[in-house]
Amino acid sequence: MTHRILILGGTTEARQLAGKLARREGFSVTLSLAGRTESPVAQGVPVRVGGFGGVAGLAAYLRQAHVDLLIDATHPYAARISANAADAARQSGVSILALRRPGWEPVSGDRWTLVDSVAEAARALGPAPRRVFLAIGRQEAGAFEAAPQHRYLIRSVDPVEPKLAVPDARYLLARGPFPEADERALLEKYDVDVIVSKNSGGEATYGKIAAARALGIEVVMVRRPFLPDVPLAETVDALAAMVDHLFDPVAERGV
Ligand SMILES: NC(=O)c1ccc[n+]([C@@H]2O[C@H](COP(=O)([O-])OP(=O)(O)OC[C@H]3O[C@@H](n4cnc5c(N)ncnc54)[C@H](OP(=O)(O)O)[C@@H]3O)[C@@H](O)[C@H]2O)c1
């Protein structure tokens, strides 16, 4: 019997999980991407691209594709698709698991200012001009047009279009991982005095946080959004173990 698994992705862990599960006998794995990134890295399993059309669209897809298990492995700030996934799974009676890497915790020497949204981060920079490193991705960079007095260094995987309507912004195109030494060199080169970051968790983008600590630079940290309460694991291996348990032949017989 083949178990059909749909993984909502867009993260490194989703790709790793898809590869791991696809190697197992009896699993048919499809990875779903939103289609935001112009040239996503190869995923190694069958991929479908683009939105489903809200909860109803996702629920219909789950039924039509005879999905047995939905895995939400999206980025922790992709709150809408996570909410939709939980609702669609409930509506269609499909099991759901989530893979969510834990957020970073501040440690001694960190200078974090916590805010609830990107718009609040723009306000938290204050009225005086500062040299800001924006490391929040391109989708919400526009919020900083509300604070045009600052000088911005903006890093993203794909170009920010349209460019920000602020007088001083530089753009860097790069895809992580970003080692701490490189991040430190970047912060020094551009004389950055504040970083705006999401609390993404994981190693790949922690370098800037560690470098900021070493240099005594403030980090305006956007708190994680509310995410639905579904069974979850924090690592690829732990999630794969949950999948094995779910499809364990003994468990399936209800013994
Ligand atoms: N937000 C971030 O900081 C961030 C960072 C790194 C990677 N990502 C990845 O980028 C993608 C989009 O993030 P977002 O913040 O724009 O999400 P979002 O606001 O939660 O989702 C907006 C809409 O995009 C579609 N969508 C999102 N993820 C999808 C997926 N994996 N497969 C198919 N459709 C998807 C859905 O459209 P429909 O309602 O039409 O189904 C969803 O309603 C996600 O896959 C996420 O993992 C996000």
Image (cartoon, rainbow, N blue to C red):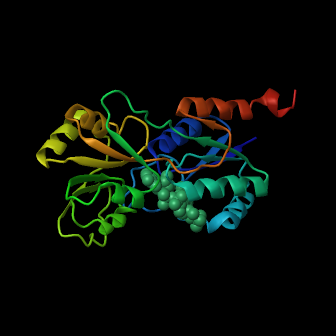
Give the position of the N terminus as an image quadrant.
top right
- The image shows a total of numbered marks equal to 0
* Residue 8 percent coordinates (x, y): 57, 51
Please name whichever residue, 39 or 242, is drawn nearer the observer in this view of the structure: 242
- The answer to whether any part of residue 179 appears in the image is no
Asked whether, in this view, residue 56 is left or right of residue 143, the answer is right
Q: Residue at x 27, y 51 (%)?
A: 174
* Residue 161 percent coordinates (x, y): 31, 70
Tell me which corner region of the image, top left, top right, bottom left or bottom right, holds residue 245.
top right
Q: Is residue 8 above or below residue 233?
A: below
Judged from this view, the residue extending furthest toward the front is: 127
Judged from this view, the residue extending furthest toward the left is: 189
Asked whether, in this view, residue 84 is left or right of residue 153, the answer is right
Give the position of the C terminus as an image quadrant.
top right
- The answer to whether any part of residue 134 appears in the image is yes
* Residue 238 percent coordinates (x, y): 59, 29
Q: Residue at x 47, y 52 (%)?
A: 116
Asked whether, in this view, residue 165 is left or right of residue 62, the answer is left
* Residue 152 percent coordinates (x, y): 22, 59
Q: Residue at x 32, y 64 (%)?
A: 144
Tell me which corner region of the image, top left, top right, bottom left or bottom right, holds residue 244.
top right
